[in-house]
């Protein structure tokens, strides 16, 4: 299906990878299949969303690969984890490892939030910690997706730790908010390292 988003395809995969490296933008690879209802809905709904389209154009290089047409050399480099369902969307560092995985159909607001988390992961990887914190603390649609908001607070703490003098004090505001707001969550459990402090 033709969408408003301009994709690279498996035939132009090398060009997409080169552009991601050159632009230092994350590479989003959407692995799709024929007769995949989630893939069709991604095309008809999510990729047609104006905000999604604008965000992808500004922050990502997008490559759509049909699961039956992936060249072996490309798969050996970029499909390094099991793909069990379609669509499977992987966010990669430019020419590098997978930063984030999205499995199945993603509605526009959810997708925007996931894309922001992927962008923040790249910022952390590139040691742009304050930019990551700024993005994570203004995560779009966080109120709609508490599980993603919890994760964002966790990564804010990580970025704050690396941004500062490598003490635990910068972590505490973010992980404190995480534990206070979402006390029963898995992410709060991960942040429960300072009993009696937060």
Image (cartoon, rainbow, N blue to C red):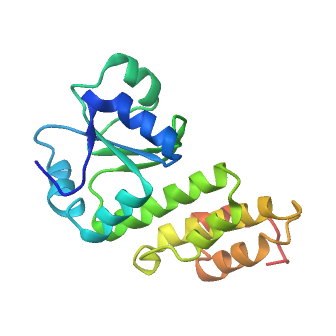
Identify the residue at image location x=43%, y=39%: 19
- Residue 5 versus residue 19: which sits nearer the camera? 19
- In this view, the residue farthest toward the top is 72
- In this view, the residue farthest toward the front is 22
Q: Is residue 142 above or below residue 48?
A: below
**Horizontal arrangement in the rendering, residue 135 relative to residue 35 (left or right):** right
**Horizontal arrangement in the rendering, residue 178 relative to residue 64 (left or right):** right
- Residue 18 versus residue 107: which sits nearer the camera? 18
Q: Is residue 148 above or below residue 68?
A: below
Q: In the rendering, at what x and y percent does residue 1 appear?
A: 10, 48
Q: In the rendering, at what x and y percent does residue 52 appear?
A: 31, 65
**Horizontal arrangement in the rendering, residue 96 relative to residue 18 (left or right):** right
Identify the residue at image location x=51%, y=38%: 21
Identify the residue at image location x=71%, y=61%: 158
**Horizontal arrangement in the rendering, residue 107 relative to residue 73 (left or right):** left
The quadrant holding residue 32 is top left
Tally of numbered tags:
0
Q: In the rendering, at what x and y percent does residue 104 appear?
A: 29, 51
Q: Is residue 11 above or below residue 107?
A: above
Q: In the rendering, at what x and y percent does residue 89 appear?
A: 36, 46
The quadrant holding residue 27 is top left
Identify the residue at image location x=22%, y=25%: 69
Position of the C terminus, as image quadrant, is bottom right
- Residue 63 versus residue 106: which sits nearer the camera? 63
- Residue 68 versus residue 17: which sits nearer the camera? 17
């Amino acid at each position: 299906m033709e969408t408003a988003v301009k994709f690279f395809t498996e035939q132009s995969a090398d060009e997409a990878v080169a552009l991601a490296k050159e632009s230092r933008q994350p590479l989003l690879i959407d692995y799709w299949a024929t007769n995949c209802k989630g893939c069709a809905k991604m095309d008809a709904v999510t990729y047609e969303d104006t905000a999604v389209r604008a965000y992808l154009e500004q922050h990502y290089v997008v490559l759509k690969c049909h699961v039956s047409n992936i060249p072996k050399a490309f798969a050996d480099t970029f499909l390094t984890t099991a793909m069990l369902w379609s669509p499977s969307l992987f966010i990669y560092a430019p020419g590098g490892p997978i930063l984030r995985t999205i499995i199945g159909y993603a509605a526009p607001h959810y997708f925007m939030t996931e894309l922001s988390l992927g962008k923040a992961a790249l910022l952390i990887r590139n040691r742009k910690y304050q930019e990551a914190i700024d993005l994570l603390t203004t995560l779009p649609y966080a109120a709609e997706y508490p599980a993603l908001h919890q994760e964002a607070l966790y990564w804010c703490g990580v970025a704050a730790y690396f941004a500062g003098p490598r003490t635990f004090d910068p972590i505490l505001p973010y992980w404190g908010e995480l534990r206070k707001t979402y006390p029963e969550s898995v992410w709060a459990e991960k942040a429960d390292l300072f009993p009696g402090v937060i």
